[in-house]
Amino acid sequence: MMKMLVVASLALAVSGPAAASLEIVKKARCVACHAVDKKMVGPAYREVAAKYQGQADAAAMLAAKVRNGGTGVWGAVPMMPHDATKISDDNLKAAIDWILAGAPD
Ligand code: HEC
């Protein structure tokens, strides 16, 4: 019984933050242009994770890109800027960490 409880709470600890991050990108409407595993208007989050794997400054660079907008990395379509009314600093950081972790379910 004890063991089951431990396993259950471990599973929660793993799925909790990922689920929260998915909620963040849904709320901020990132999902209008991005999916986890297929290209839409913007690149799939898992492709983004693969591209920047092992790049130490990726999180800061990508957070700034989402804030300020930009183009030319994945094609000619620009991503528009997202100010703090669209996504707070904390939520942006959580979303980028989740994307770079491979957008786990
Ligand atoms: C209107 C469509 C649209 C929305 C909404 C949008 N994006 Fe994007 N996103 C794009 C496009 C297009 C690109 C590719 C830009 C490029 O090629 O440089 C992109 C690129 C990215 C990248 C990779 C940037 C790079 O330089 O490799 C990340 C990370 C990202 N978006 C996260 C987000 C997050 C988080 C949100 C929500 C706050 C969001 N996007 C909302 C269209 C969108």
Image (tube, rainbow, N blue to C red):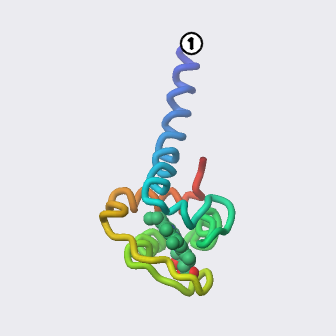
Indicate the position of residue 44 as horizontal and vertical percent values: 63, 66
Closer to the camera in the image, 37 or 49: 37
Closer to the camera in the image, 87 or 103: 87
Instruction: Check disc 1 and report its element: helix, strand or loop.
Output: loop
Residue wearing tag 1: 1
Indicate the position of residue 42 as horizontal and vertical percent values: 59, 72
Residue 59 quadrant:
bottom left
Residue depicted at 32% across the width and 60% down the height = 88
Closer to the camera in the image, 46 or 66: 66
Residue depicted at 51% across the width and 56% down the height = 98
Reply above or below: 49 against 14: below
Closer to the camera in the image, 55 or 88: 88
Residue 102 quadrant:
bottom right
Q: Please tell me how crowded label 1 is: few (under 14), some (14-19), or many (20+) other residues with Cα within 10 Å.
A: few
Indicate the position of residue 57 as horizontal and vertical percent values: 45, 74
Residue depicted at 38% across the width and 71% down the height = 82
Q: Point out the image quarter for the N terminus.
A: top right
> Three-letter amino acid code at disc 1?
Met
Reply above or below: 38 against 74: above
